[in-house]
Image (cartoon, coloured by chain):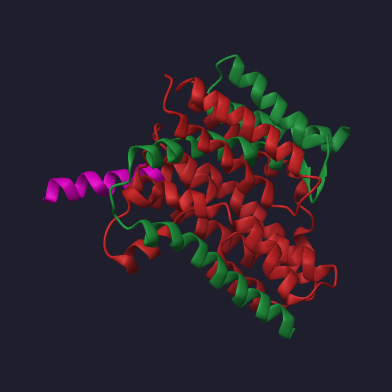
Chain colours: A red, B green
Amino acid sequence: MSSERERGSGVYFAGARAGLPFALATFVLGISFGVLARSLGWGVVAPIVFSVITFSGSAQFAVAAVLGASGGALAAIVAAVLLNARFLPMGVAVAPFLKGGLLRRALEGQAVVDASWALASRGGGRFDREFMIGATVPQVAAWIGGTVIGVLAADVVGDVEWLGLDVIFPAFFLALLVDELHDGEQNIAAALIAAVLSLALVPLVPPGVPVIAACAAALLGLRGRSS
Amino acid sequence: MKALWVAIVGVALASAAIKAMGPVLLGSKELPPSANAVIALLSPALLTALVVTQTFGEDSHLVLDERAIGVGAAALALSLRAPVLLAVALAALTTALVRAFG
């Protein structure tokens, strides 16, 4: 039993190491969120609480965008929900690999963030639970820590967009996608359909919806595997 | 200020519920093979959609800006079999350079 436990903790650490580069980028994005929140007059406490209980960059920037443009709370929530709706299919994909009863599974599901989910994908629909949870820990810490620094040092730090760290995520997802495309013609077909769907929908629907709609490309799997 | 706190608590609860939904509803049930085949294709579909929207999407517009150049640099590096971290670093560096001097 103990050897199994050791193997498990080794995988958590491997995941945490793999998550470190993303933690660095997340840290800087957290700073920029804190700076933005201060500039919107949110004070010190609210942005930090927000990062602690939500730890979702896309949703939190969306709330800032909506409220900053004098939108209401409901509009902000709707925008954030649409953006985070992608975690539903991601959660479905990892669900068979999580452990325990309902409450524990619900908690483990909170570890799903873009980079960790992608890092833990082992192809063919399999996921490494320990690796995913390990990769999420440094990213959450970095997001909260970045927010704190951004909020407290808003005047000193200023805008950090010039660093180019926002492209770290799409570039990394592209690298993982290239790996996935080696796994058969059906993956390539699904990716092509998803690309067309999301490109076509970006100008037509609110942000977040194109990503969800592109998941429809996975229904190609119902036609049976050709490779 | 009240709207801010309503939004913060609402988004936190909604986000947690969305993430919990799949793991809770599916439990540890064995899924039929057809469902597994669909789930297996979620990875390439979601990854593609994330790349496309985070590279070309700006609110509800398609744009071609410094991000596309950076991600393009990563694509080029990957096609030359560069390691993933190098390709990702190149993307950030390229985007930063174009933002600074472009």
Whether residue A56 can be seen here: yes
**Front-lying residue, A58 or A222:** A222
Residue at left offset 39%, top offset 61%: B25
Residue at the image position 76 percent from the left and 44 percent from the top: A202
Question: Dividing the picture into quarters, in which one does residue A156 lie?
Answer: bottom right
Q: Is residue A41 left or right of residue A12?
A: right
Provide the residue span drawn in magenta: A1-15
Q: Residue furthest top?
A: B80
Look at the image and tell me in which quarter the N terminus of chain B lies: bottom right
Looking at this view, name the residue that lies furthest to the right.
B102
Residue A110 seen in the current view: no
**Which percent across, then down, holds residue A61?**
71, 60
Residue A30 x %, y %:
64, 58
Measured as percent of width and height from the top left, residue A194 is found at 63, 35
Q: Quadrant of the C terminus of chain B?
A: top right
Against A134, is A150 above or below? Answer: below
* Residue situated in front as seen by the camera: A203 or A170: A203
Q: How many marks?
A: 0
Could you tell me which residue is drawn at 73 percent across and 81 percent down?
A: B3
* Residue A180 located within the stretch drawn in magenta: no
Please state if A93 lies on the left or on the right of B92 as rendered: left
Residue found at the far front of this picture? A223
Q: Residue at x 75, y 70 (%)?
A: A75
Instruction: Indicate left or right for A144 with A102 as reference.
Output: right
The extreme bottom residue here reads B2
Q: What secondary structure predominates along the stretch shown in magenta?
A: helix
Q: Nearer the viewer, residue A220 or A59?
A: A220
The answer to if A14 sits in the magenta stretch is yes
Can you say whether A18 is above or below A30 in the image? above
